[in-house]
Amino acid sequence: MEITLLAFFAVGYFVLAGADLGVGALLPYLGRSDDERGRVLASITPFFLGNEVWLIASAGILVGAFPVLEGELLSGMYVPFVMLLLGWMVRDAGIWLRGRVDRAGWRGGCDGAVATGSWTVVLSWGFILPGMGQESVTGLAAVIIVPAVAALFCAHGLAFAGLRLDGGPRERARRFYGASSERTVYALTSGGMALVCLLAGSRLPLTENLADPATLALLTPSLLVITPVLVASQVWLWRVFGRAPVRSQ
Amino acid sequence: METLDLARLQFALTAGAHFLFVALTLGLATLVALMQTRATLTGSAVHLRMTRFWGRLYVINYAMGIVTGLVMEFQFGLAWNGLTHFAGNVCGASLAMETLVAFFVESTFLGLWIFGWDRLNRWAHLGVLWVVTLTAYASAYWIMVSNGFLQNPVGAEVVGGVLRLTDAAAVLANPAALTAFGHILCGALLVAGFFVAGVSAHHLRKGTGEQEFFRRSLRIGVFTALPALMATAALGGAQFDTAQPMKIAVYAGRTEEVARLQAEMVAAHGPGDYVPPAGLVQGSGTAMMIIFALMLGVAWLSALLALFPWAVRRLRIWHVVLTAMIPLPFAAMLAGWVFREVGRQPWAVYGLLTTEDALSDLSPGAIRFSLAAFTLLFGLLVVVNTWLLARNARQGPADTAVTPTAAEPLPAPVF
């Protein structure tokens, strides 16, 4: 049960936040002007906070139900995880702060922070995901796997941008779709994200590292009760802000 | 410095930077929720504008709190895997509850509040802010359950070198967690009270065009700060009963008592230095007390003066003092944390696991890199946040758009 919960939240993170990371990484490509980049970011701002907490929840389940493994995993890949956190902070700061000062230079700096931070996060995942269970990848494997993971994030971001934007940014996102519809592409890239997450997670020694039964007897039922509430709150968020795409004025 | 010192410094900076933001967020959320409640119940226009103005400052600050909070969530696993190994069965569960019950709900609902001004029914929008506020409290509670356990490990026993949970109720109702939780909540209200009063006093002194708005705000701030200060002090005093005897003995400078406790510890745990660094413990404890005394004087005087409309309008010297008070509760908060955490040394879990044994096996290069990078980024965030808060506070409520206007479907985020 604990493994299912962990998988649920981790897949949720890669599918939901994977899209806004991809959009962030491709911000300079999708938005060619200050105004366009503003609209591209507006497609993710109501959601990114709600998206990234799926990873916080995954980390919480990991430390609660698999505490020893959490410590070994994070400290074992210390530098990639520190890079992930640094990129995450820089990117979030850029998104939060962009609208705060009405100057082109400020917005440009924030756009740069979003793109640089998103790339740092995406590339860190490229090192971390294949290394689950041991150490982060090096050598030839890294040369192949890291760009492949980054490409998947970008594709997922393009799929999301196609669904949520219009005008120039949407056309630039659609260029890669071929004849497929936005929904098909989004379903495909979401599936890819989920698959990569589950493949990486399947290499973790989870069953061997479960917390003490006395702890789980209380923790697991609590998590099971709260999870539907969490999902319902997210559904509400997407229903309120997810209907209309971001239009140009 | 050794890896241990560097890792401790990194933890202290992460927790300290995070807590600077959290202290204001927790308190300000409560005040904004109360303002919005009044606005929604009575349809009062000035309270609606107050909700938007103070809400904007709240959101600016919240953003930086969450960004530093991300690092906080991962800090234990990264640098202190000895702790997750030894105490994971107890502390891991409360951290897990914090992420799901609090962090997750709080973030989702904050998104709904920021962008939901014109999209949600006004009662739903008010309810959303109360959920954000209460889950922020829940977050503080679960964190204090973890921290309280490290201070005063109850409800668990050591079996085969790791802790097992034996009495969950004892962990959840640990006095070292509950009194500190109350102390922090009231302290956060104190921070917010002085913040609201100080910003309002600035506008009243400058004679900006929003006199009624800031007269009301100043009174809210002052009448929050005084009771919050009294409750903070009472709950702080109550903690002396559950604090480690060694911490209190070192703080009070009772050398004989310190020597006796050191001998006891050596007898129980083998040779070693079990005395926390006296300079930091006494310095931080004393700083907290001095700032308390200062705040006490100003809070009482302010509560009296706030009863006189002429003083609220024109007593410029008082306005200057109130604005100058803004940083003091933050400083007291940080001093309190240093006192609580340094005073527990050399233990990570008091009497059971030393800080040294809690440390992950990290290379000195890795920890130097992360410490430098985090320090740089935290420093930058604190500076940018302070600048933005000051800038927005000075601008006043004139064009306070917490949110986009209704005319555009989902325009650029000016939240």
Image (tube, rainbow, N blue to C red):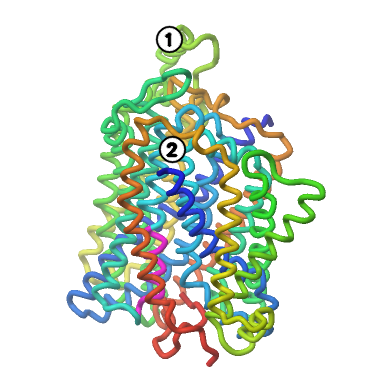
- Whether residue B286 sits left or right of residue B141 in the image: it is right
Residue B4 horizontal/vertical position (percent): 62, 30
Dominant secondary structure (helix, strand or loop) of the stretch shown in magenta: helix
Question: Around disc 2, counting alpha carbons within 10 Å, would you say few (fewer than 14), some (14 to 19), or many (20 or more)?
Answer: many
Mark nearest the camera among 1 and 2 is: 2
Identify the residue at horizontal 57%, vertical 60% (top origin): B383
Residue B48's place in the image compared with B129, above or below, is: below
Instruction: Examine the rendering and report whether any part of residue B398 can be seen.
Output: yes
Residue behind mark 2: B92
> What residue span does the magenta drawing correspond to?
B105-117
Residue behind mark 1: B264
- Whether residue A247 sits left or right of residue B121 in the image: it is right
Q: Quadrant of the N terminus of chain B?
A: top right
Identify the residue at horizontal 32%, vertical 58% (top origin): A229
Question: Which amino acid type is marked by label 1?
Answer: Glu
Identify the residue at horizontal 35%, vertical 78% (top origin): B117
Question: Which amino acid type is marked by label 2?
Answer: Gly
Residue B134 horizontal/vertical position (percent): 30, 56
Residue B115 horizontal/vertical position (percent): 41, 75
Q: To which chain does the residue with label 1 belong?
A: B
Question: Around disc 1, counting alpha carbons within 10 Å, would you say few (fewer than 14), some (14 to 19), or many (20 or more)?
Answer: few
Please determine if labels 1 and 2 lie on a single subunit: yes
Front residue of B39/B318: it is B39
Front residue of A195/B401: it is A195
The single residue placed furthest to the left in the displayed view is: B42
